[in-house]
Image (cartoon, coloured by chain):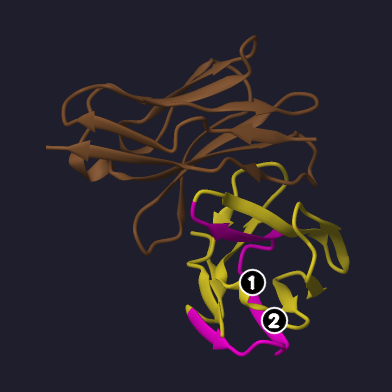
Chain colours: A brown, B yellow
Amino acid sequence: AQSVAQPEDQVNVAEGNPLTVKCTYSVSGNPYLFWYVQYPNRGLQFLLKYITGDNLVKGSYGFEAEFNKSQTSFHLKKPSALVSDSALYFCAVRDGSSASKIIFGSGTRLSIRP
Amino acid sequence: DVKVTQSSRYLVKRTGEKVFLECVQDMDHENMFWYRQDPGLGLRLIYFSYDVKMKEKGDIPEGYSVSREKKERFSLILESASTNQTSMYLCASSHGPTKAFFGQGTRLTVV
């Protein structure tokens, strides 16, 4: 069965510092991995995905994520945090079949202090 | 852009009522999903549909059913609403194993 773990409920970072939001996954076969962001009173917005290819993928708003197959991880990163990055972040995984479920983690609240 | 529309942003229902949550997508996606979102628990999959009239249970299907009679519409049904079903409900759709697009959510309160 597929599963996703986000070990940190909250991550606090000062503006201008680098940030990392952690995610580990379990899936049969090759993983399709995603990060989504949710701002207050808004729906989920897609940030980036890994399907195949380069282990470092770049997404919206300057975010990137690194796929590590041996550690089954897909951590979200940004070199320099902005106060506007404060939001709820979700990692998700699905297998590569056309009719596959999407399983989400429990979410990490990112708080950027000025 | 893909649009996923949920029929209501806010709903208040009484315990024991039958509740219908509707979701429509406009991009001919074959996959549609219903999740509930609760603080600290993330998004939990209730049901998933990969084609018209086809459905699979997710992680928490108890107390819910679904209907997909047309490709663009996926309905979530609470047969007899209970207070523990008070939550934010999110609908999503996708083409194949690619990224999913989400609706704005329906905040359901059962009193």
Residue type, label 1: Gln
Q: CA distance from mark 2 to mark 1?
A: 7 Å
Mark on residue B73?
Answer: none
Which residue corresponds to mark 2? B81
Answer whether residue B17 is magenta in the image. yes
Residue displayed at 77% across by 54% down = B58
Which quadrant is home to the C terminus of chain A?
Answer: top left
**What element does badge 1 sit on?**
helix
Which residue appears farthest toward the left when viewing the image?
A: A114
**What element does badge 2 sit on?**
loop
Give the overall secondary structure of the magenta segment: strand
Mark on residue B85?
Answer: 1
Place residue B80 in its image quadrant.
Answer: bottom right
Which residue range is magenta in the image? B10-39
Residue type, label 2: Ala
Asked if disc 2 and disc 1 are in contact, CB closer than 8 Å, the reply is yes
Considering only vertical position in the picture, is A64 above or below B65? Answer: above
The subunit carrying tag 2 is: B
Answer whether residue B64 is magenta in the image. no
Considering only vertical position in the picture, is A80 above or below A71? Answer: below
Q: Nearer the viewer, residue B14 or A60?
A: B14
Residue displayed at 64% across by 58% down = B93
In the rendering, at what x and y percent does residue A91 appear? 54, 37
Residue displayed at 72% across by 75% down = B75
The subunit carrying tag 1 is: B
Considering only vertical position in the picture, is A14 above or below A100? Answer: above
